[in-house]
Image: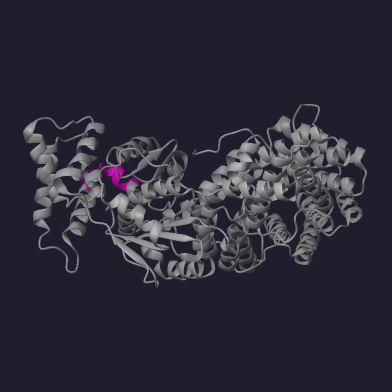
Amino acid sequence: MSYHLPPVLPGFVGRERELPALTDALREHRLISLTGAGGVGKSRLSLHAAHGFREATGREVAWADLWQLPDDRLLVAAVADALGFADHTPAVPLDALGGWLADEDPLLVLDSCEHLLDGCRSLVSQLLRECPKVSVLVTSREPLGVPGERCVALGPLPFGSDALSLLERLADDAGRPLTGTADMMAATRLCARLEGVPLAIELASGQLAERDIHQVDRELAQLLDLQTPRPRGGPRRHQALRTTIGWSHELCAPAERLLWARVSAFRGPMGADAVREVCTGGPLAPEDVEAALAGLVRKSVLTRSRECYRMLDTVREYGRMWLDALAESDRIDDRHALHHARTARRADQAWFGADQVHWYRWISASHVDLCSALDHLLATDPEAAVEMAGHLGFFWSCCGHLPEADRYLEEALRLSSAPGPARNRALWALGVVRVLRGEHEAGRDLARACRHQAEQTGDTDAVLRAAYLLALTHLLGGRPLAAEHVVDTALAQVGGSPARTQTGGWPALAAPRAMCRLARVFAHTARGLLDRAREGAEELRRESMERGEWWTRSYADYQLALIALFEDRADSATAHAISMLEGKLRIGDSFGLALGLDLLASALAAQGAAERAVAAHTAAERYWNAVGHPQRGTPELGPVRDRYEATARSQLGDAGYDEAAARAMLRGPGAITWELLGRTPPGR
C-alpha cells in the first residue's frame, strides 16, 4: 500500500501569499476547495501545498488526477488507486473505501473535479462523514457545495511581477531571453493582455522559438482586440485563454493541428508509438508524427516526461472540439480502441516472460485509456470487448483493479455469447476475480463453465487455466488433495513436457502450465509433502529466473519461505520472503505484498529479530486492510503467523511488543516494506 503523490515540478513562480495561506487552511479545515478559472494554476499550487503539508504534519497525501476521467464511473477506482486501496471485497466500492479509511488520516487531493461535481460531492460527503481523520483538498472551477466546505479562490498571477517572472523563465527556456527595456515592456504588456493566466502565458511563450516577444505581443493584441466585447457571462481572462489557445492552434503547422485534434482521443499519458498507430493517416504520414510531436511540445500544447506525452485538459478539450469538427471522432476512437485492444493482447502473450514487469506498468499507466477503449468496444464491437477484457482481467486482478475487472468482464460476457477462446478466457478471468473477492462458490461455477466450453472447443489453454482456478478454490477451502487431483488431471489431459525444448525454446502453454504446477506445489506444502513441494518450487523459480518473469517466481519464493519455516530454517525463509516482496513490488501486487510481509514477519521472529518482525507484521496488517481480503492466504499460513507472532511477543514482552507496533504504525506500511528490503522508497 502506497499513496500516490506526484513530485513537484521545477519552475514554480510566485504565490508567496497563496501558498502559505492554503497550507494553513489545510491544517484548520477538513474540506478545502481551491477554485478558479481553467489554466490559472490550481493544480500546481495544490501540489506544492500538498508536499508542504506532508513535510509539516507527517501525514500522508494521496493525489487523484480526475481530469482524465470522462465521467464518474471510474471515480471511486481512481481515488482508491491514489490511496493504495486494492479492494478485494464484494462490497459497494465506496462503502469498502470508507470502511478502510475509517481510522486513517491522509489528506486526499482531488484534482480537476469540475466535470464530476455530482460524483465528487457524494464521494467527499460520505468519506468526511465516515472517516473522521481524513481531510480533502479539491481543485475545481466551482465549489462542491458540501456542508463545511472552505472555499479558497485563486486568481491569476499579478501582471507586473509574478506573471512577468514566469514569462522571463519561459523565454529563457525557449532560447529567447528578454533583454533590454523594450523587451521587458513588451513582456509586461503581453502578461497584462493575457490577464496573468499561467496557461495562457505558457502557450504564448511556446511561440518564442519562432517569434520574438514583440511579434507575439502584437499578434495577440490584434486577436484580442478583434474579439471584444467579451463573451456574455465570462470574465476577460476566460477570453484571453480561449484566444491564446486558438491562436496557438492557428500558428501550428497543418500536421501539428491535425495531430493536436487526434491525440485528444487519449486521456492519459501516451507513447510515441501509440500516437503513430492511432493518429497517422490521410495527410499525416507516419514519418511526420515525430516532427509534429516535437512541434506541439515546443508550443507547450503537449508536455513530455521521459518517453510519454501528456496534454492538459483545457488544451485537450479544444483538440476534441476540432476532432468533432473534422468529423473524425468516430474513426479515431475506433483506432484508439483497436490500438489498446491489440496492445493488451501483446501484453497477455508476453506475460510469462522478461517483459512482464513492463506490461504491468504499462497497464497501470494506461488504465483510463484502457477503460475508455473498452467502453467504446462495448458499444461498437462486444466480441472484441470480450477478448480485450479477458486479456486484461488477470493483470487487473493482480494489481487491485478488481471492481473494474468485474464490471467490464460481466458486461462484455452479457453482450456477447459467441463461443471460443476469447469467451473462455473471459470466463476464467471473471472466475479469478470472484475467488479473489472471497466468492469461492461463484469462482468454482465459472471454472467449471470455462472447462466445459474449453473441452467442447478443444481449447487446451483454457483447460489448464480452468484447472488452476478450480484448484485455487480448493486450496483456499483447505482441500489440497482435491486441488492436486484437478491440476494433475488437466496436465495429463493436455500432455507435453513443461521443460525447455531441445532447441532452447519454451513449449506452448508455458504460462497456464506454470500456474497448474504452482497450484500443485501449494497442495504438496499443505499436505506436508515438503520435499516434493520444495523440488517443484525450486524448479519453477529456476525457470522463472531464466525467463526474467516475476509473478510465478514470487509465489515460488512464497512457498520456499513457508517450507523453510516448517523446517526451522529461518535464514532461508527470510531470504525467500524478501525475494517475494521484491517481485510483488515490481508488479504492484498489494495482495502478494500482504502475504509476503506475513511470511517475513514470521521468519524474522524465528531469527530473533523481534523488533523488525513486529514492523513487518504491522505493515502486513495495514496491507491486508487495504486489500480488504476476507481470508489471509491459504489455511496453512494461519498457524505459522500465529506461532511467530507469539514468539515475537514473548521476546519483547507485551509492553515492548505494543510499543514497537505503535512506532511502526507511525511510519506507514510502504516505508516499512522498503526499509525491510534495505532500499529507499521511490519519490523520497
In the rendered structure, the answer to whether residue 356 lies left or right of residue 441 reads: left
Scheme of image coloration: one colour
User: Where does residue 305 sit, x and y in percent of width and height?
Assistant: 41, 38
In this rendering, position of residue 640 left or right of residue 88 = right
Q: Which of 423 and 511 lies nearest the eye of the viewer?
A: 511
Q: Is residue 147 visible?
A: yes
Toward which corner of the image does residue 254 lie, by quadrant? top left
Instruction: Indicate left or right for 113 with 255 as reference.
Output: right
Residue, x 79% and y 36% (percent of image)? 607
x%, y% of residue 569?
Answer: 85, 35
Residue located at (62% from left, 56% from top): 626
Q: Residue furthest left?
A: 182
Q: Residue furthest top?
A: 503
| 46 or 441: nearer the viewer | 46
Query: What secondary structure do most residues of the magenta stretch adopt?
Result: helix
Q: Which corner quadrant of the image does residue 102 belong to?
A: bottom right
Residue at the image position 41 percent from the left and 63 percent from the top = 31
Tell me where residue 453 appears, x and y as whole percent.
77, 61
User: How many marks on residues?
Assistant: 0
Instruction: Indicate whether residue 405 is drawn in magenta.
Output: no
Relative to 22, say whether 275 is above or below: above
Q: Is residue 682 above or below residue 126?
A: above
**Residue 496 visible somewhere in the drawing:** no
Q: Position of residue 136 (x, y in %)?
A: 44, 60
**Magenta stretch bounds:** 250-259
